Each structure stands twice: as structure tokens, then as C-alpha cells.
Amino acid sequence: MTNEKEVVLYTVHGATVTLTLNRPEKRNALNDAIIDNLKSSLRKANDDASVNAIIITGAGKDFCSGADLSALQKISDASVSENTEDARSLLELFILIRAVAVPVIAAVRGRALAGGCGLASACDLVLAADDARFGYPEVKIGFVPAMVTAILRRNVSEKRAFELLTRGAEIDARTAQEFGFVNQVFAPENFAAEVQAYAGQCGKLSRSAVGLTKTLLYQIDGLAFTEALAAGLDVNVIARLTEDCQKGVARFLKKE
């Protein structure tokens, strides 16, 4: 039986950290232990200046099937305040993924359903095997993927978001890419290597520039046009003063 300390495996390959949901016998269903371990692992990776990308993936055949049975039982038995605290933990995970300075990449094989699909959509980038499946079946049991709605609405069009959230149907990887939900689709037999190669490209980029860009991109979501430009001006000035930018400009001028 999986030990609580092992529900998320933390491995390092070059400048890439891989966080593997490690409950394959439960299709990597989410529970308190996985969510807590994901948060602590994300903070650990973020604090390591040598890390340029984080991959979240699942052990076994599936990425994540959503909440496990014990979590669903807890929802049905809990009070309002207990349910609020339980939901808040997932909210903190979603916020943390956006707060981490480096790209967080969901590497999806098999099924990413309900909360598992929410976890994938919360990541900055989604890479999928050609046989991956995505879906939000919550409406079938009278539940609402409520916090995920804020994320999905920023990933796809309003019409696509409505369809995905209210019909409860699964879609394949190619359809998810067509919707704008998935960035890249790879053949299943080459998936692990393709994901590592994709993430490895982050190691060739400026960590500070990528981090500033990520922060700005998400910051301007709720801003008016002129305010977004002003935020961009601030980041422009900050970027000019970074060591990476100054060294990069010097190399460019020397080459010219």
C-alpha cells in the first residue's frame, strides 16, 4: 500500500523537476495527502534556483481520475465550514501553480477527469499523449467544477467552456488541442521522451524572463487595456535591470 510520503514522487532531470502522482491503483485520485504533497513539492522546486520547469504527471495508465471515494464521502458528510476548508486547500494549489516562477507542465496520459482535468487545466502548459482523455463529469452527480471554471474560462472560449462544464462528456487529446486546452499532442510510445525534451527547452531560456512573463500574463487577466500596458511597462523596466537581460544584451551586441 502506498505510503503517504510517497503519494507524490519528486525526481530531478537536469533543470526539470517531475512530480508524479503515485496512486496508480486508484488512478491517481486526489485526496488530502496528494494535494498537500503537491503544494510542498511545488514550493521546494520553486525555491531551487537551478530548476527551470516542473512537470506534473501520473504513475500508471492515467493522469488523475479526480477525487477519490473517501474524499467524496467526506464532502457528503461534512459541514459547511468543513467543506469550505476542504475546497480552500485545492484553491491554494491552483493559486500556487500560477505563483511558481517557472512553467508548470501537465503531462497527461490516459484519463484526466473531474479534479484531475482541473489540475491539468491549472498548469501553465498541457502536453498530452494521443490516447489521453479529458472531461468534467461532475454535473452527472449534481456537483459543480466551480473553481476550475475560473481557470477553464481563461483557457478556452466561453462556448467551449460551457460545453465542457455542463455536458459532462469526455473529449480526446486532439479535440482538446483544437479547443485550445492542450498545447501539444505526442504519440504514446514516445510520450515520456517528448515531454522531457519539451521541458528541457526551458533550461535554455532565462529563468527570470520566463518568470516575469508568467507573472505579467496572469496579472493582466483582470486589468483594463491601459492598466495592462502600465503593468507591462513596469515589467519592461524590471527586466532591463536583471542580470540575465544585461548579460544577454551584452552577448548580442558582441555577436553583432
Image: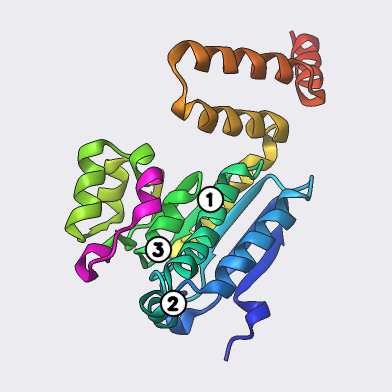
Question: Residue 176: x and y, percent?
Answer: 29, 49
| Residue 147 or residue 25, whichever sits in front | 147
Q: Nearer the viewer, mark 1 or mark 3?
A: 3
Element carrying mark 2? helix
Q: Which residue is mark 3?
A: 115
Q: Assign a secondary structure to mark 3.
A: helix
Position of 218 compared to 183: left or right? right
Q: Residues within 10 Å of mark 3 (few under 14, many from 20)?
A: many
Q: Which residue is mark 1?
A: 105
Residue sitting at 69 percent across and 42 percent down? 203
Q: Is residue 34 left or right of residue 142?
A: right
The region drawn magenta spans 138-151
The crowd level at tag 2 (other Cα within 10 Å; few <14, some 14-19, many 20+) is some
The quarter in which the N terminus is drawn is bottom right
Question: At label 1, which amino acid type do we have?
Answer: Ile
Q: Amino acid at mark 2?
A: Ala
Task: Find out whether residue 234 is within the magenta segment.
Answer: no
Residue at 23 percent of width and 43 percent of height = 160
x and y percentages locating residue 56 in the rendered image:
55, 59
Q: Residue pushed farthest bottom?
A: 1
**Quarter-of-image position of residue 178:** top left
Q: CA distance from mark 1 to mark 3?
A: 16 Å
As helix, strand or loop, the secondary structure at mark 1 comes to: strand
Mark 2 vs mark 3: in front: 2
Distance from the alpha carbon under mark 2 to that under mark 3: 11 Å
Residue at mark 2: 71
Amino acid, disc 3: Gly
Q: Give whichever of 196, 30 is nearer the camera.
A: 30
Q: Are marks 1 and 3 in contact (CB under 8 Å)?
A: no
Q: Which image quarter is the C terminus in?
A: top right
**Disc 2 to disc 3: CB gap under 8 Å:** no
